[in-house]
């Protein structure tokens, strides 16, 4: 299913901004012909991994003007859907479970600072069978009642092909340990960023089903802490924890729109590689 034109434009702009920073850093290297000791000036890294989430409770506000409905589901409980906890990861496509990837670029000789494109394919499902409170106007009638929200009764609400957090991060790396030959390096990495959310919206409310689709759904901001172990300079494994706050709006429901805000706590395990991109020459002091 095609993403919206607005989503494509957002992703293109983020991508151009990232590669603009990369180009600037590469052009900034000295062009002099002095001979001396070479130092790495910058490096690109990529990682892929899987995640698990826990969500805060939140209200879901639904407006359906044609049905004369304007109501809230109060303090709904939601869960993730890992997709790899009840069968082997390698028995299904790599993109079916909750996954994440990072594409980053370290700047400077010390490689302490960087920028990163950060994507988390997270799944958000309102928990089936919960006792749901509903308050507002439903088909012209004032309501404040509780009912069982379940697929068996004709109700479900999924961001199951992804709640989908995109972030443009600033990255700070701090070395914790390294051996003399740097064949084993242990780093702490901190990240902070902001970006769009791109949910796949699928729901059925009181028997009325929406046309499921990917859409631009609002914005999110996140903080991530990482412990990374790099082996033989180029391969690494890392364990991350992350908090994210997302504000969703204009989510498609039958004959209307929904909005909600919720926080997320994530645990992430990833593997990746580092690729040096260029060098600069530092003239050695004369003895």
Image (spheres, rainbow, N blue to C red):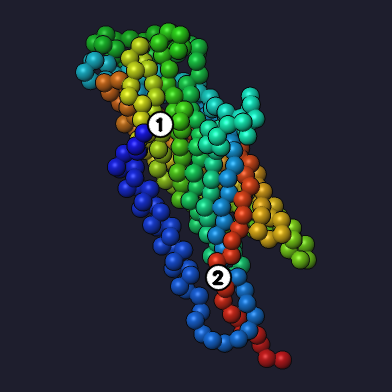
**Drawn side of residue 238 relative to residue 20, left or right:** right
**220 above or below 193?**
above
At horizontal 63% and vertical 34% (from top left) the residue drawn is: 90
The circle on residue 9 is none
| CA–CA distance in space, label 1 to label 2 | 39 Å
User: Which residue is the extreme one toward the left?
Assistant: 66
Q: Which residue is mark 1?
A: 200
Q: Helix or strand or loop: what does disc 2 sit on?
A: strand
* Residue 193 seen anywhere in this rendered image of the structure: no
**Drawn side of residue 51 relative to residue 25, left or right:** right
Q: Residues within 10 Å of mark 1 (few under 14, many from 20)?
A: many
* Residue 109 seen anywhere in this rendered image of the structure: yes
Q: Earlier in the sequence, mark 1 or mark 2?
A: 1
Quadrant containing the C terminus in the rendered view:
bottom right
User: Which residue is the extreme one toward the right?
Assistant: 180
At horizontal 33% and vertical 9% (from top left) the residue drawn is: 143
Front residue of 235/39: it is 235
User: Which residue is the extreme one toward the bottom?
Assistant: 287
**150 above or below 79?**
above
**Drawn side of residue 24 relative to residue 43, left or right:** left
Q: Which residue is mark 2?
A: 278
At horizontal 57% and vertical 63% (from top left) the residue drawn is: 43
**287 above or below 29?**
below
Residue 178 appears at what percent x and percent y?
A: 74, 60
Residue 109 appears at what percent x and percent y?
A: 59, 70
Q: Residues within 10 Å of mark 2 (few under 14, many from 20)?
A: some
Q: Helix or strand or loop: what does disc 1 sit on?
A: strand
């Amino acid at each position: 299913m095609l993403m919206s034109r607005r989503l494509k434009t957002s992703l293109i702009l983020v991508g151009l901004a990232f590669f603009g920073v990369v180009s600037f850093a590469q052009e900034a290297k000295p062009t002099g012909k002095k001979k001396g000791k070479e130092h790495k000036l910058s490096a690109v890294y990529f990682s892929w991994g899987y995640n698990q989430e826990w969500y805060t409770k939140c209200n879901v506000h639904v407006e359906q003007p044609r049905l004369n409905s304007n109501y809230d589901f109060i303090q709904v409980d939601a869960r993730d859907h890992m997709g790899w906890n009840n069968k082997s990861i390698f028995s299904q496509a790599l993109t079916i479970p909750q996954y994440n990837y990072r594409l980053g670029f370290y700047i400077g000789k010390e490689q302490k600072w960087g920028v990163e494109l950060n994507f988390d394919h997270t799944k958000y499902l309102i928990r089936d069978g919960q006792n749901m409170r509903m308050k507002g106007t439903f088909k012209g009638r004032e309501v404040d009642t509780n009912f069982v929200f379940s697929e068996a009764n004709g109700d479900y609400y999924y961001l199951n092909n992804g709640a989908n957090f995109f972030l443009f991060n600033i990255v700070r790396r701090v070395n914790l340990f390294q051996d003399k030959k740097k064949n084993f390096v242990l780093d702490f990495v901190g990240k902070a960023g902001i970006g769009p959310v791109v949910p796949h919206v699928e729901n059925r409310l009181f028997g009325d089903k929406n046309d499921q689709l990917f859409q631009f759904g609002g914005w999110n901001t996140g903080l991530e802490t990482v412990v990374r172990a790099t082996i033989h300079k180029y391969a690494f494994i890392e364990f991350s924890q992350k908090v994210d706050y997302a504000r969703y709006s204009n989510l498609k429901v039958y004959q209307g729109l929904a909005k909600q805000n919720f926080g997320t706590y994530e645990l992430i395990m990833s593997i990746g590689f580092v690729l040096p991109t260029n060098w600069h020459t530092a003239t050695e002091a004369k003895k």
